[in-house]
Image (cartoon, rainbow, N blue to C red):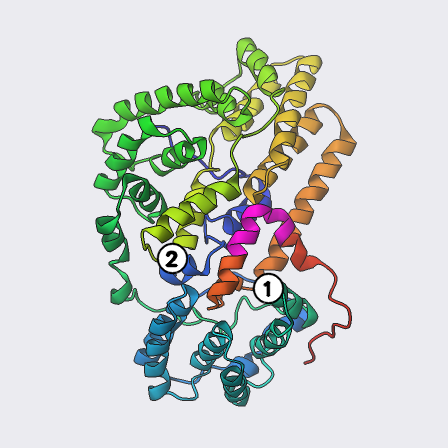
Amino acid sequence: MTDPIPPPSTQGSSGRKAALWSGVGLVVALVAGGALFFRGRQSPPGHDAHDHGEHSPKKQGAAKPTVSPEVLRHTDRAARAAATGELKKARESLGEALMLAPRHAPALFVHACLALEEGNDAEAATVLGQLAAVAPGSPELKLLETLRELRRAPGVSWQQAFRDAWVTLGRPNLGKSELLPGATPLPPDPTASDWEKLAWERAPSDDVKLRLALASRKLDADKSLFLLAQVPRLENPDLYLAVRDALRGESLPESEHERARKTFRQKLESLAAAHPRSMQLQLLLLLGDTESGTELTAAEIDALERVATLPAWRETSFHDGYRETRRLLKEAGVPDASALAMAVSLRGINERGTWILRTRNVATRGALSPEGRQRLGRITRDIGASLVQQTTVVERMTGLQLVRGGSQDLEDDAGRTLAMNQIKELEQAIAVFQQTAMERWPLNSLTEELLEESTRDEPRYLQSFGAKAPAGAARMGP
């Protein structure tokens, strides 16, 4: 196999922020999936976050009373169950927590979320009153109260209500919230440790096992060999790229590396022949197995020029792939199906071709004439422009980086400035969205809509949180 592949963008803060949203660090916040956050948390969220002036959570409003580890564990279990839609289990764990500590604010917060999720308005009102008594003035409480009011209107989705409530309250930064689940780091929960093993053992088909392996946080040897065995039958380029990403580095035993190289190359040639209009596959076929940081040959530049004229970056839909994986996992009864489907889909956009192109461009520029540099710049810009049309932040950011570099080689200051401004706008949208800490809210319906909307057009979704406040909105008071 090839050496480990860096994230799609390794230059500056934009690559790091895009990676955070698109699953390298979260998924969500991603990124994206409260279920993955609750299942895989290792340290308190917001550890590296920055306060944002008057809208940072007020410590006095969300102070944590001293409670026993048992209360914290029951509250954490309730939050995880609520986030993944297991409401009965959430109620059971919540009951244990509140029996031991009836005024524990984080448990009351989860209780209020459960009542809202179930549409029990009277219960929600009662619990919100209890929460106000122990966490008066907290932004989380105000957001829940506003969310409850907005959700009463017919046809208002969870996402729309949450976004409008958060904007109306002045976009409070909830990254260091003491009320949201995850404020206190806990050791791994033994009751949640066997879900992957059970799901694997009960998987009804290789298609389901394929997705489970791709969504695994760590592959063992058996799963790695299973994934390699699936490669010859894969006809979906996104699944091929996902398996390629999962098996990079040291995932496979060394004795299997040569077989893996041949298997992946043969399948890539087959997929490229079946998708001759896919810029992604043709670029990977041309450069994917070449040495990074080496000078491009004249023949490779000629081939790159042909690749840059192809009509589409890829011929698959990120949204459709996500929905198909979610369908398979849900039908198989796999827990956290939506979050796992997002993890699988995100693997499918981790491609090696553009990274190799950037490193080899750097090695080649100095050896080219001014006309040759402009030619390479035009190629790079055009490939980047195709990527910019994609619906994920990682692809959009990678494309903008390529456009910026290509424009610089073309001595196109206006094009370079435009790309840089678009990068900054996307970075700002990511930073604004991260202040919601949405991945920590134990509202399953909110998370489901988050994943659904973001797979349609992730940059547009993020930018919607920076939009102007709804008419009549008032900023949150001190």
Image mark for residue 157:
1
Q: Most extreme residue toward the front, as rendered?
A: 154
Q: Can you say whether 454 is above or below 107 in the image?
A: above
Disc 1 + disc 2, Cβ < 8 Å: no
- Does dot 2 land on a helix, a strand or a loop? loop
Q: Which amino acid does label 1 sit on?
A: Ser
Query: Where, by quadrant of the figure, is residue 347 drawn?
Result: top left
Q: Provide residue 19's location: percent of width, then percent of height.
A: 51, 46
Horizontally, residue 36 falls left or right of residue 278, namely left
Q: Can you say whether 281 is above or below 47 in the image?
A: above
Q: Provide residue 377's location: percent of width, then percent of height.
A: 66, 22
Q: Can you say whether 444 is above or below 462 in the image?
A: below
Q: Which amino acid does label 2 sit on?
A: Asp
User: Residue at horizontal 43%, vertical 66%?
Assistant: 83
Can residue 29 be seen at all in this image of the molecule? no
Query: Where, by quadrant of the figure, is residue 406 drawn?
Result: top right
Q: Provide residue 339's location: percent of width, then percent of height.
A: 42, 54
Question: Which residue does the numbered mark 2 point to in the structure image?
Answer: 336
Magenta-drawn segment: 450-461
Residue neighbourhood size for the residue with mark 2, other residues' Cα within 10 Å, grouped as few (<14), some (14–19), many (≥20):
many
Image mark for residue 138:
none
- Does dot 1 land on a helix, a strand or a loop? loop
Which quarter of the rendering shows the C terminus? bottom right
Horizontally, residue 433 falls left or right of residue 218, namely right
Q: Which of 384 and 361 is in front in this view?
A: 384
Q: Which callout, 1 or 2, points to the residue nearer the camera?
A: 1
Q: Can you say whether 62 is above or below 34 in the image?
A: below
- Report the magenta stretch's main SS: helix
Q: Nearer the viewer, residue 189 or 151?
A: 151
